Image: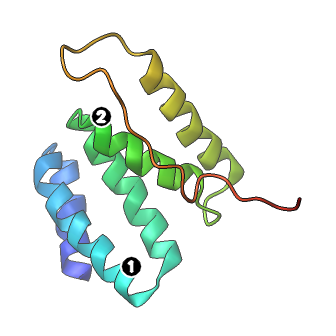
Amino acid sequence: QLLGKDLADFYMKKGQPQEAEMYLQEALKTYQAEGWPLLIAHTRKQLAECQKQLQQTQNYLQTSSLLAGDANLTETERIHFCQEILNLTKEPDSGQDDRLLLGMEGFLHLQSL
């Protein structure tokens, strides 16, 4: 999987996020199966950048929501992804379906009742 992550970095540096995305998705699946939360967070950040560059709004929104609620990121990083979500709601029509669907699991954690 290290080779896949290296290839993803290579393609991102070459300006080919569509190629990098495939390797990042595979690495993410592996890290999730093996339970590596820090690697999951880092890979999601890279994946979010690919999705943003590829203008995959729905995917970027979902990845940003996961990152916004990820306790492995700094507060500054989490706020950044919250702001990205808000920014997406303000973007003008692109001629596509106007609905942006966002699952809220993992986004909020109830501390007490």
Determine the image quadrant of residue 88. top left
Quadrant location of the N terminus? bottom left
- Figure check: 93 above or below 68: above
- Figure check: 100 above or below 37: above
Q: Residue furthest right?
A: 113
Residue at 19 percent across and 74 percent down: it is 4
- Figure check: 19 above or below 23: above
Residue at 16 percent across and 42 percent down: it is 15
What is the CA distance from the residue labelled 2 to the residue labelled 1? 23 Å
Q: Nearer the viewer, residue 98 or 91?
A: 98
Q: Nearer the viewer, residue 65 or 72?
A: 65
- Please state if 58 lies on the left or on the right of 17 as rendered: right
User: What amino acid is found at the position of numbered circle 2 in the picture?
Assistant: Thr
Q: Position of residue 42 (x, y in %)?
A: 45, 64
Q: Residues within 10 Å of mark 1 (few under 14, many from 20)?
A: few
Q: Disc number at residue 32?
A: 1
Residue at 49 percent across and 33 percent down: it is 85
- Secondary structure, mark 1, is helix
- Please state if 54 lies on the left or on the right of 103 as rendered: left
Q: Nearer the viewer, residue 100 or 76?
A: 100
Q: Which residue corresponds to mark 2?
A: 57
- Secondary structure, mark 2, is helix
Q: Position of residue 28 (x, y in %)?
A: 32, 71
Determine the image quadrant of residue 19. bottom left
